[in-house]
Image (tube, rainbow, N blue to C red):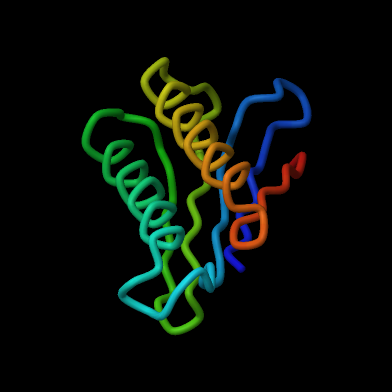
Amino acid sequence: MTQVTIYTSSSSGEVVGFRAEGHAGYADAGYDIVCAAASVLIINTVNSIEQFTKDSCVAEADEDNTVIQLMVKSSSQSAELKVLLSALVLGLKTIADDNPNYLSITFEEV
């Protein structure tokens, strides 16, 4: 199962990062549409943040352990960053709602 943790600010409630780990297990590697869908959303979000915002973020990926995470380091967030992170959460929630045995999302205040 792919497990995604969405980190939110305890003071503002804004999304300030995420961590995704594991394979969905929907199908064999290369045929797993749940894993592919989540991966595209996550990687596109990281790339879009880097390309379209000036917010300070740290992204890390560990392919051997199937982990990718991003944490916002800016003290205030641009409107673009807020939209990109909200869109990620929306997309992941949609996938999880349709595939609860393969993708789980938790929220954690930091």
Q: What residue is drawn where x is 61% and y is 68%?
A: 1
Is residue 102 shown above or below 75? Answer: below
Q: What residue is drawn where x is 60% and y is 32%?
A: 15
Q: Quadrant of residue 21?
A: bottom right
Q: Quadrant of residue 83?
A: top left
| Residue furthest out toward the bottom | 64
Decide which of 45, 104 is in the foreground and name it: 104
| Residue furthest out toward the top | 79
Q: How many marks?
A: 0
Is residue 98 shown above or below 81? Answer: below
Q: What residue is drawn where x is 47% and y is 36%?
A: 91
Where residue 110 sits in the image (x, y, percent)? Answer: 74, 42
Q: Quadrant of residue 29?
A: bottom left
- Asked whether, in this view, residue 93 is left or right of residue 83, the answer is right
Is residue 92 shown above or below 76? Answer: below
Q: What residue is drawn where x is 45% and y is 58%?
A: 34
- Asked whether, in this view, residue 15 is left or right of residue 62, the answer is right
Decide which of 101, 21 is in the foreground and name it: 101
Decide which of 65, 34 is in the foreground and name it: 34
Where residue 53 sits in the image (x, y, percent)? Answer: 30, 28
Where residue 42 sits in the image (x, y, percent)? Answer: 40, 49
Where residue 100 sits in the image (x, y, percent)? Answer: 66, 53
